[in-house]
Amino acid sequence: MTEMDYIFKRMMNITDRKALVEGAYVVPQDTFGAIICTAGEAEVSIGEKVYRIGKHALILYVPFTVIRVLNCSEDWNVEMFEENIDFVFSSLSNVSVRKRQAVRTVSCVMATAAHYARLNQLLCIIRQREELVRENPNEEQAEILRDIVRRLAQVLCIELMEVYFECVPIEDLPLSKDAQIYNRFITSVFRHCHTERTVNFYAAEQHLSPGYFSVVVRRQSGQAALKWIEIITMSKIKQYLRRPDLSLKEIAELMNFSDQSAFGRFFRQHENGTAPSEFRKGL
């Protein structure tokens, strides 16, 4: 991973909405990010809350947040920006801790066209400078450009917080008791599937009997709770298999399997007999 890749781990137009709508994104432990809706509308689950977002809505999120797009219009599109959290906090040294903590309780605000224009102007400039870095064969000049990009990224962090506090919070949608149970369950599975893969664990977490808990999950989603645990676990495993820096043994350890053979059996059972190594070769 280059320094530039590290500074901008994700900065893109999301055009493959299917990946977000059908799955979920779990924010890494060292990451702070922002999503700006540029077109369309969607209902987005952020942690245990659901928001209806439209054009110019701004979402700020913190480590370990689970983000799911529940439904969206055909023209729905967003800009997504992520940074290492140490870089972000060093950029926001003059922003009070109280204000930074507010992001944890209110994730989503409604920005204006003027706010979006300010942010988009910065994003365009950063992209242009990144392109110059890639095209410049002179390492000394490229290093100067990299420093410009770093400083622009700091400005973007400050601008995002400024816009956030200038805007009106978007109220989360009221959810039924069953929907709250289901949302908490899905969020928890993404956080704990490395180590916990039983219905009993997730039912106990919400102080519910496994039987009642299972009925609620099936009623809300049409799928059994255990099936969701398996789906999300496989999704996490496949994310790891897409990383060439991780061996199968390391992935087995990360997912808390007793050994690589147990990991292989689990994967084949839930991937129509395909072994992890075969899945990786087919990527």
Image: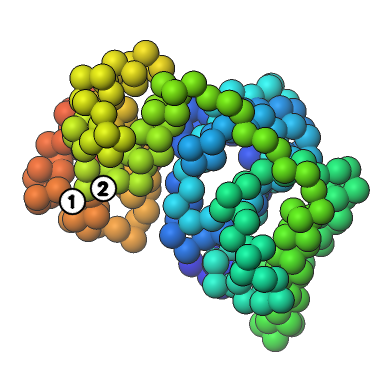
What residue is shown at x 74% (from left), y 66% (from top)?
158
Q: Nearer the viewer, residue 183 or 142?
A: 183
Q: Quadrant of the C terminus?
A: top left
Q: Position of residue 9 (x, y in %)?
A: 56, 59
Write down the quadrant of residue 113 in the picture: top right
What residue is shown at x 72% (from left), y 43% (from top)?
169
Write down the quadrant of residue 173 in the picture: top right
Which class describes the residues within 10 Å of circle 2: few (<14), some (14-19), or many (20+)? some
Marks 1 and 2 close (CB-CB < 8 Å) = yes
Question: Tag 2, which secondary structure?
Answer: loop
- Residue ID for mark 1: 256
User: Is residue 283 toward the left or the right of residue 258 in the image?
Assistant: right
> Considering only vertical position in the picture, is 259 above or below 50?
below
- Residue ID for mark 2: 194
Q: Residue 16 carries which label?
A: none
User: Is residue 178 toward the left or the right of residue 36 in the image?
Assistant: left
Residue 222 appears anywhere in the view? no
What residue is shown at x 15% (from left), y 43% (from top)?
263
Q: Nearer the viewer, residue 88 or 3?
A: 88
Question: Tag 1, which secondary structure?
Answer: loop
> Considering only vertical position in the picture, is 173 above or below 194?
above
User: Is residue 156 toward the left or the right of residue 10 in the image?
Assistant: right
Q: Distance between the residues labelled 1 and 2?
A: 6 Å
Q: How many marks?
A: 2
Q: Which of 168 and 199 is in front in this view?
A: 168
Q: Earlier in the sequence, mark 1 or mark 2?
A: 2
Q: Which amino acid does label 2 sit on?
A: His
